Each structure stands twice: as C-alpha cells, then as structure tokens.
C-alpha cells in the first residue's frame, strides 16, 4: 500500500486553521459588541471591559510608579475617566491604546500634584523615555525592565546629573553648582544621558538575529 500523499497531511491542518480564524473573528465581534454596549451605558458590559483591560492599564502604571498603592488609585481614575467619556469608545481604534493614553495623562497630572520625591522622579524619567523609545518600539513597557541596568551603565557624572535633575527641586544653575559645571553644560549632560539611555534601551529591545 502506498503511503498517503503529503498534501493529505497538510490538508488535515486546514480545518484547524479555519476554526482558529473563525474563533478569532468571533472574539473580535464579541469585543466590538462589548465596546458598543459599554458606550451606550450598559454597566455590565463596562464591567466586563474593565476586566479585559485592567491588567494592561495597571501594568502600565505600576511600571512607572514606585508605590503599588499609587498604581491602584490611578488605575481606578483611568477607568472612571473612561466611563465618563465612554461615548468616545466607539471611535477608539484600539481600546487598549486609548486607555494607555488616558493613563499617561493621569500620570502627568499626578506628577504635577505631588511634591518632588523619588517616586515622582522615576515616573518623570519613565514618561520622558516613553516618548523617546516609543518612536521606534510599540511596547515601551519592556524597555522599563531594562532601565535600571541602563542607568548603571552611565558614567558617574551622567548618573549624578540625572539623579539631581529628577530627584531634587534644584534648578539647572543649582545643579551646575553642585557638579561644578555651567548651566548649559549640565543641560547638555542630561540630554546626552537621556540619549545614552535611549540607545541602551533600543539595543536591549532589538531582536537578536
């Protein structure tokens, strides 16, 4: 008896692939219906939407805040704003990205309300690096996992400048006095330190061949 032709074995995978495609389409339709119902004020649908995206929102905030309690509070604020502005849900191309955008705005407001402390300094630095790294990488959360190592790779002067810039209330000229540099030299040092951090994060995020 001849063995079955190879095409038969390949054809056997076709139903499975078609089933997966149908499942993905059904999931997309289900989520679309969920978004529309939430947009119309259906509280159960909105609660289900929160359950789907709360890990994404909390994870984004937690990576940029030192205190877990702050992340929890701001996560609630994000979904409160989402509910109050739910009429925009149907116009959002990607709900997850829209929520992260709200979370980023909430973080910026959080910084302005707080006094200068180490936790806020970390958040400020993360947001600035988000803007730099996000131009080339869609997921900047992974970058933040590498940030401590990249900070360690900076030279001593650059680390001191970054620390004074983000963890004190000192003005540029005062930082310059501490580092025995001119105000312009300090600004350039901090700029180069941020660029070095971006380069380091880009390198770590670059897929290995």
Image: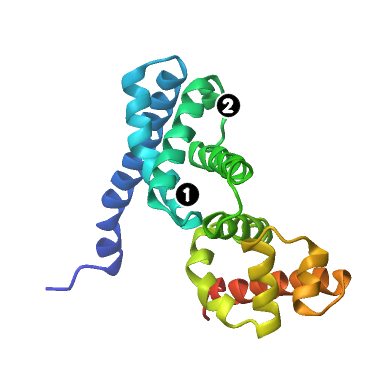
The number of callouts visible is: 2
**Which disc is residue 189 wearing?**
none
Q: Residues within 10 Å of mark 2 (few under 14, many from 20)?
A: few
The image shows residue 51 at horizontal and vertical percentages of 33, 36
Residue 158 or residue 197, whichever sits in front:
158
Circle 2 is placed at which residue position?
91
Give the farthest residue toward the left: 1
Where on the picture, by quarter, is residue 203? bottom right
Where on the picture, by quarter, is residue 199? bottom right
Which residue is depicted at the point 59% across and 83% down?
A: 153
Measured in 3D between alpha carbons, the distance from the residue under mark 2 to the one under mark 1, in whole angstroms, is: 24 Å
Above or below residue 86? Residue 59 is below
The image shows residue 113 at horizontal and vertical percentages of 60, 40
| Residue 80 makes an appearance in the image | yes
Asked if the residue under mark 1 is in contact with the one under mark 2, i.e. CB atoms within 8 Å, the reply is no
Which residue is depicted at the point 44% across and 44% down?
A: 57
Which residue is depicted at the point 47% across and 19% down?
A: 39
**Which disc is residue 61 wearing?**
1
**Element under label 2?**
helix
The image shows residue 3 at horizontal and vertical percentages of 18, 72
Above or below residue 133? Residue 96 is above
> Closer to us: mark 2 or mark 1?
1
Residue 98 or residue 63, whichever sits in front:
63
Please state, as top left, top right, bottom left or bottom right, where the N terminus lies in the image: bottom left
Residue 31 or residue 156, whichever sits in front:
156
| Residue 155 makes an appearance in the image | no
The image shows residue 179 at horizontal and vertical percentages of 76, 78
Residue 183 or residue 201, whichever sits in front:
183
Above or below residue 163? Residue 93 is above
Q: Residues within 10 Å of mark 1 (few under 14, many from 20)?
A: many
């Amino acid at each position: 008896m001849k063995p079955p032709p190879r095409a038969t074995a390949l054809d056997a995978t076709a139903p499975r692939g078609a089933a997966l495609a149908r499942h993905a389409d059904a999931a997309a339709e289900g989520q679309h219906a969920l978004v529309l119902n939430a947009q119309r004020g259906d509280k159960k649908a909105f609660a289900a939407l929160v359950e789907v995206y709360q890990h994404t929102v909390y994870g984004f905030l937690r990576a940029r805040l030192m205190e877990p309690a702050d992340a929890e509070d701001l996560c609630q604020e994000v979904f409160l704003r989402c509910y109050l502005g739910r009429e925009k849900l149907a116009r959002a191309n990607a709900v997850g990205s829209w929520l992260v955008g709200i979370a980023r705005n909430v973080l910026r407001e959080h910084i302005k309300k707080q006094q200068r402390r180490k936790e806020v300094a970390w958040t400020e630095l993360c947001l600035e690096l988000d803007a730099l790294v996000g131009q080339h990488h869609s997921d900047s959360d992974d970058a933040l996992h590498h940030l401590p190592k990249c900070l360690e790779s900076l030279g001593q002067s650059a680390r001191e400048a970054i620390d004074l810039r983000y963890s004190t209330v000192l003005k540029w000229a005062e930082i310059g006095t501490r580092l025995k540099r001119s105000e312009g030299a300090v600004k350039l040092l901090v700029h180069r330190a941020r660029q070095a951090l971006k380069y380091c994060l880009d390198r770590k995020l670059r897929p290995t061949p």
